[in-house]
């Protein structure tokens, strides 16, 4: 497959390496600032020959990028986050041009498997009220937000699938926790790239699901797999659509 990279920062470079590993060709690298880019902006010429584009840029430019790419009739993988409030107008544009788009706030293959395992485990533990459930995430001390977006997704999956958990609490709790509360805590320490754990705990034992990221490679691999999947498709999809198709 022929890929155009939009954004050649930390993720763009990693996606390039993963795409080459998987036998794809990078036909253009579009970035207004990076010296090694082949083009400064998206145009018919910079996208010519590409089957799919992969965008890892910035929330302020990504929607314009999507609209341009779709206007030139190309499909796109959107790794850039922070634009989902504009999803409706983006869907209209994609439908109008009959192109394809797949997006995810977390393209990590391992993490998307953890999402599915958490959903499955939560459905099972819903039947066993002896088990309580909680989550914890660890990240490096440079991370600006807490809890992580991924922790929120995990907590929401648990809440949707365990009827006795009606509220999520991400804060410290200076009182006894209520039975219907799901506690999901955050810890910031050193250089940890990102660890998320789900604990199902009873008097007898603890069942633990855990994902530990070593680096950002998992995101890049997921984005390239998504590019292979969205090639020739029409419509707007999320990584969940891809996962559901792969594991059915
Ligand atoms: N979905 C995921 O799995 C996932 C994983 C990691 C990062 N991200 C997101 O991806 C985005 C990029 O992350 P990063 O770490 O690579 O950032 P980065 O700052 O290292 O790179 C962004 C690059 O985009 C370029 N850029 C800016 N405007 C552009 C435009 N109009 N056209 C083309 N290129 C443009 C910049 O010059 C820069 O080189 C962020 O929104 C980040 O949150 C998503």
Image (cartoon, rainbow, N blue to C red):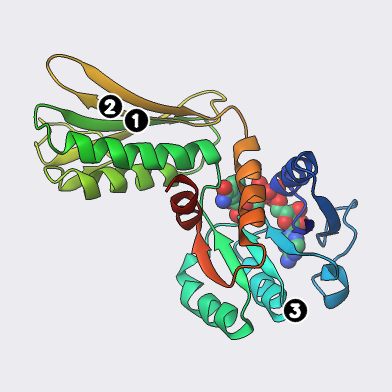
Q: Nearer the viewer, mark 2 or mark 3?
A: 3
For marks 2 and 3 on the same chain, the one whose residue lies earlier in the sequence = 3
For marks 1 and 2 on the same chain, the one whose residue lies earlier in the sequence = 1
Determine whether the beta carbon of the residue marked 1 sits less than 8 angstroms from the nearest atom of ligand 1.
Answer: no
Instruction: Pick whichever, 190 or 131, lies toward us.
Output: 131
- The reply to whether residue 147 is in sight is no
For marks 1 and 3 on the same chain, the one whose residue lies earlier in the sequence = 3
Element at label 3:
loop
Dot 3: few (<14), some (14–19), or many (≥20) neighbours within 10 Å?
Answer: some
Element at label 1:
strand
Looking at the rendered structure, which numbered label has been put on residue 149? none
Reading the image, the residue beneath label 3 is 72
Element at label 2:
strand
What separation in Å lies between label 2 and label 3 (alpha carbons)?
47 Å
* Quarter holding residue 214: top right
Question: Against 76, is 17 above or below?
Answer: above
Decide: marks 2, 3 in contact (CB < 8 A)? no
Determine whether the beta carbon of the residue marked 3 sits less than 8 angstroms from the nearest atom of ligand 1.
Answer: no
* Quarter holding residue 203: top left
Q: Residue furthest bottom?
A: 96
- Image x and y of residue 45, in percent: 88, 74
Q: Nearer the viewer, mark 1 or mark 2?
A: 2
Dot 1: few (<14), some (14–19), or many (≥20) neighbours within 10 Å?
Answer: some
Q: Residue drawn 51% across and 54% down?
A: 242
Count of numbered tags:
3
Reading the image, the residue beneath label 2 is 199
- The reply to whether residue 10 is in sight is yes
Reading the image, the residue beneath label 1 is 136
């Amino acid at each position: 497959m022929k890929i155009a990279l939009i954004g050649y920062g930390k993720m763009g470079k990693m996606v390039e390496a993963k795409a080459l590993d998987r036998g794809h060709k990078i036909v253009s690298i579009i970035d207004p600032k990076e010296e090694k880019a082949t083009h400064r902006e998206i145009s018919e010429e910079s996208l010519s020959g590409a089957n799919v584009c992969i965008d890892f840029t910035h929330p302020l430019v990504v929607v314009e990028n999507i609209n341009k790419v779709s206007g030139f009739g190309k499909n796109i993988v959107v790794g850039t986050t922070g634009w989902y409030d504009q999803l409706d107008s983006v869907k209209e544009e994609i439908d109008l041009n009959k192109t394809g788009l797949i997006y995810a706030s977390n393209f990590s293959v391992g993490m998307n498997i953890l999402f599915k395992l958490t959903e499955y485990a939560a459905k099972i533990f819903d039947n066993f009220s002896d088990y309580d459930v909680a989550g914890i995430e660890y990240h490096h001390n440079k991370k600006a937000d807490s809890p992580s977006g991924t922790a929120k997704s995990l907590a929401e999956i648990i809440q949707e699938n365990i009827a006795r958990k009606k509220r999520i609490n991400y804060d410290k709790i200076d009182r006894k926790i209520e039975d219907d509360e799901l506690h999901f805590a955050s810890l910031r320490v050193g250089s940890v790239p990102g660890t998320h754990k789900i604990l199902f705990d009873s008097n007898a034992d603890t069942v633990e699901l855990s994902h530990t990221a070593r680096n950002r490679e998992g995101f890049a691999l997921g984005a390239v797999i998504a590019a292979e999947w969205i090639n020739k498709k029409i419509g707007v999809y999320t990584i969940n659509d891809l996962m559901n198709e792969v594991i059915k």
